[in-house]
Amino acid sequence: MHTSMSNAAVQHDADTAWRALYTRHRHEKAVANILSSKGFEVFLPLYLAVHRWKDRNKQLSLPLFPCYVFLKGGLERQLDILRTPGVYSLVAGASRSAVIPEEEINGFRRMLENGIRVEPHPFLKSGDRVRVKSGALAGVEGILIRKKGQFRLVVSVTILGKSAAAEIDVTTVERVSSRNVAAA
């Protein structure tokens, strides 16, 4: 009996987990509105961006993650979800829909609810080879590391087996493509 209760609890968690839907480009808002009107709990994080045309500037509310809408639970109505105009698929991992941790969704919600300026940024992780885009170190390449909550750029002299690290603002770096790393 304990096992069936555990399975039921696991099933309940799976039914209420956050998942990502892959959508048609520029259809994120429509998908979110349609799914909300069907009774689904959706989350579409938006940010403000100013687009400049030669005759005017316009402030736009754009998806933080283009082509993605987050959905909580509702998989018992998977066909209804997938038949929604603009939805291509559920994002999958290991042959089933991938679960997004509640803490990650809550982190984005807190940033947006508190009026913090949020904008898209390339996904970077410790160990990535990066190049500084601006500032005093513009053009310098190295390895991104994290130490005591700060990001550092490690620059090495390979032949000597020596390195030096400097604190950097992670928003000023871009990942160096693997092709560039191979050439270097």
Image (spheres, rainbow, N blue to C red):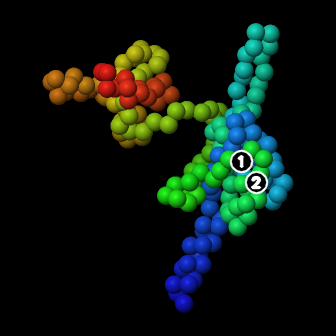
User: Which label belongs to residue 105?
Assistant: none
Vertical placement of residue 20 versus 78, above or below:
above
Q: Would you say 134 lies left or right of 126 here?
A: right
- Counting the numbered discs, the total is 2
Q: Which residue is mark 1?
A: 87
Q: Quadrant of residue 92?
A: bottom right
Q: Which residue is mark 2?
A: 83
**Residue neighbourhood size for the residue with mark 1, other residues' Cα within 10 Å, grouped as few (<14), some (14–19), many (≥20):** many
Residue that appears at 76% across and 54% down? 83
Looking at numbered disc 1 in the image, what kind of residue is underneath it?
Val
Measured as percent of width and height from the top left, residue 93 is found at: 52, 55
Vertical placement of residue 140 versus 79, above or below:
above
Q: Kindly give the residue lying farthest to the top in the view shown.
A: 54
Instruction: Please identify the quadrant where the N terminus is shown.
Output: bottom right
In front of the other: 157 or 83: 83
Measured as percent of width and height from the top left, residue 3 is found at: 51, 84
Instruction: Please identify the quadrant where the C terminus is shown.
Output: top left
Residue that appears at 70% across and 40% down? 24
Q: Would you say 128 lies left or right of 21 here?
A: left
Secondary structure under badge 2?
A: loop
Marks 1/2 in contact by CB < 8 Å: the verdict is: yes
